[in-house]
Image (cartoon, rainbow, N blue to C red):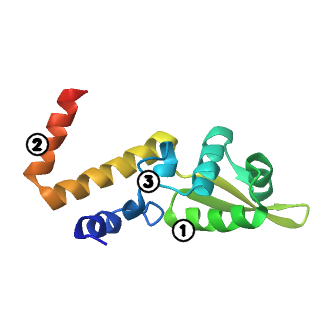
Amino acid sequence: MSTIFKSLYVNCKPMVKLDQINISNNGLTKFFSPIEASILKTLWNEGEMTTSELTEKTKIPLTSVAGTLDRLVKAGYTARRVENVNGRVRYVYEPVFSEEEAATEITTKILDSLVDAFGPLARENFSKYSDKK
């Protein structure tokens, strides 16, 4: 792993593996696995949901949804709360960030890491880029 990517990875949430960014993918799948992206998108669009509701909505197997939700909770992208319904425990998940807030967080951390690694050269390139847009 190159030094720049080690630096970038350290400064981002574990879920966003910057050394594995897939530029050819669209949207969130540049930074998240397709399952992670699908779950996050569904939570952003639908609001809080249980594991079984997410399984039904996304058509992703329950075991994959449950494991991915655990990782998303640990990484700070979703929150989990316990509800008791008729004596049964169920977990309800909701996004911690809006889609825009997640994008802002990821973008900011990437840009901060680039400035840390390249200093004035990074700022100069950002300026050139913004002038093109």
Which of label 3 and label 2 is nearer to you?
Answer: 3
Residue under label 3 = 22
Q: Residue 49: where, in percent of width, then height?
A: 72, 50
Q: Secondary structure at mark 2?
A: helix
Which of label 1 and label 3 is nearer to you?
Answer: 3
Residue 97 shows in the view? no
Residue type, mark 1 in image: Lys
Residue under label 2 = 124
Q: Residue 23: where, in percent of width, then height?
A: 41, 49
Compute the Cα span from label 2 to label 1.
Answer: 36 Å
Instruction: Pick whichever, 44 or 91, lies toward us.
Output: 44
Which callout, 3 or 2, points at the residue further toward the start of the chain? 3
The residue located at (14%, 57%) in the rendering is: 118
- The answer to which quarter of the image holds residue 126 is top left
Q: Secondary structure at mark 1?
A: helix
Which callout, 2 or 1, points at the residue further toward the start of the chain? 1
